Image (spheres, rainbow, N blue to C red):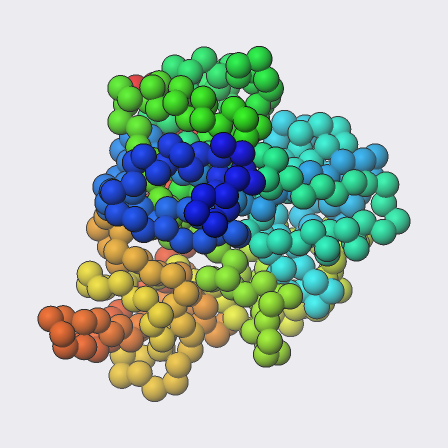
Amino acid sequence: MSASQVAQGRLVTPFYSRQRELDTLNRWHEWKGYTVADAFYCAELEYFAIRNATAVFDLTPMTKYRIRGVDATAYLDRLMTRDMYGLAVGRVAYAVWCNDAGQVLDDGTVFRLGEHDYRLCSQERHFDWLCASAAGFDVEVVHETAEIAALAVQGPTSFSTLERMGLGDVRSLKPFDLMSVDYAGTPIVVSRTGFTGDLGYEVWLPPILAEAFWDDLFTAGAPVGIRAIGGDALELARIEAGYLVAGVDFLPADEIVRPGRGRSPLELGLEWLVDFGKPHFNGRRALAEEWRTGPRRRFVRLDVDGNKPARDAYIYARPGGGKQVGFVTSAAWSPVCKRSIALGTVDARYGKPGDTLWVEIYYNQEMRWRRKMARASVVEGPFWDPPRRRTTPPVPY
C-alpha cells in the first residue's frame, strides 16, 4: 500500500493495513491529511509499552523535506537559530526557525545525511517559505513526506527489537546519531531519536518496504512485548519529557491573527538553541534586542498538587486567585512519575525554578463541576529522563 493510496476517501499511510488489523476502538483522527489512530486497544496500556517494552508509532505523516546542494549548509544556517555548520554528517539536531520578528515559525529535527544532503522534519508545512528563502542559494528543496515512510520504535526494549532484526550496528548509535543500513537489499535510515523522552529510534524507509518491515519488526519484538501505539499514548509520553508541540504549546508565527500571540525561542525556554555568535540568521536582530531587554514571558514545567490534570487551567501567583499570570498549554496525570504535571506560559517575572504558583482546575465529578486551586511548583528539566535514554550501548533484553 503506497503512502498516496486512499481508503474510503481518506489518505492513509503505508502501514495502515497492518494498523487496521489491530484496531478495536475505531478512534482515528486526521494528521496533515492522513488518517492516524488515537489508540488501538487502550491508550493507557499503549503508554506502558513506551515505558516498559517496545512501542511503535507511525510517523509517516510528519512533514519531511529533502534539502540538497552545495549551499545546503549555508542555507540552513541562515534559516535556523542554531549553528548548522557544527552538525556533522551522520548526526541529527533539534532546531527552531523564526520570522524576521524573532517569533518561532516551527521546531523540528535536521538530519545530515551527507556532505550536502539534509532532511528537515517538522510539524507544520513550510514548502513555500523554504523555497522563497532559497533565493540566492544553490539548493534544491523537495517535499518528500509521501516518499518516506517512518516509524518511531521507542522504549527500553526497542534496542533489542532492532538488533534482533539484524539492522546493522544499532548498538553503536549514540543519541542523535543516524546510520544507513541495508534492509531487503535497499538502504534505509535508522536514527536514535524520538519524542518520548526514553530510549528509542526512528526508522525511515521507502513506502514499498513498509508492510514487510512492519511484519519483521513485530516478529523480532514479540519476545520483548512490542505493541503498536496511537497518538494518545505518545501525547502523554511527550508531556512527561517536557517537549513542545506547535499548535498546542505555541502558535506558529505565520498562523497568528492577533499581535503578541506568537512566541520567541527565549520565551519557550529554547535560548540554548539561539547562537548569537552567528553573524546572520532569521530574526537575529529582534532576538538580540529581546535578549538585552529580557523576554516578556517564560515557559514553565509544573508539578501540580493532587491528581487532577490541570488541562486548560489559568495560572495565578496567589492561592486566592486575583491577577492571572499565565495559562497551562498541556497537562496530564503521569503514571510513571505518579504526579499531576503540566506545561505552560507565565509572565516573565514569575516561574523561576523553585517558585510556587497556583492553578485553577475545573473537573467533573459525577455530573457536578468542581473548582480547585492547586499549588504548582516550577521544576527545571523534564519530568521523566531515565539514564537508559543516553546509555550507549543500551542494555539488551
Q: Answer with the quarter of the image where residue 98 lies.
A: bottom right
Q: Is residue 262 visible?
A: yes
Where 358 sits versus 159, above or below?
Answer: below
- Residue furthest out toward the right: 136
In-front residue for pair 40/178 = 40
Confirm whether residue 50 shows in the render. no
Q: Nearer the viewer, residue 216 or 391?
A: 216
Rendered residue at 31%/28% (across/down): 226
Percent of width and height locating residue 267: 55, 65
How far across and down, in percent of the image, does residue 132 sit? 79, 55
Q: Nearer the viewer, residue 59 or 358?
A: 59
Up-down relation of residue 27 to residue 326 (above or below):
above
Direction from residue 48 to residue 188 in the image, left or right: right
Q: Measuring 53% from the left and 16% from the top, which residue is drawn there? A: 183
- The image shows a total of numbered marks equal to 0
Residue 121 spot, x, y in % from top left: 59, 43
Relative placement, left or right, of 183 versus 73 is left
Q: Is residue 81 above or below residue 322?
A: above
Looking at this rendering, what residue extends furthest in the left direction? 366
Going by the image, does 338 lie left or right of 190?
Answer: left
Looking at the rendered image, the quarter that the C terminus falls into is: top left
Measuring 64% from the left and 72% from the top, which residue is drawn there? 293
Give residue 379's quadrant in the image: bottom left
In the figure, is residue 75 to the left or right of 24?
A: right
Coordinates of residue 142 in the picture (x, y in percent): 71, 41
Which residue is depicted at the point 13% across and 74% down?
367
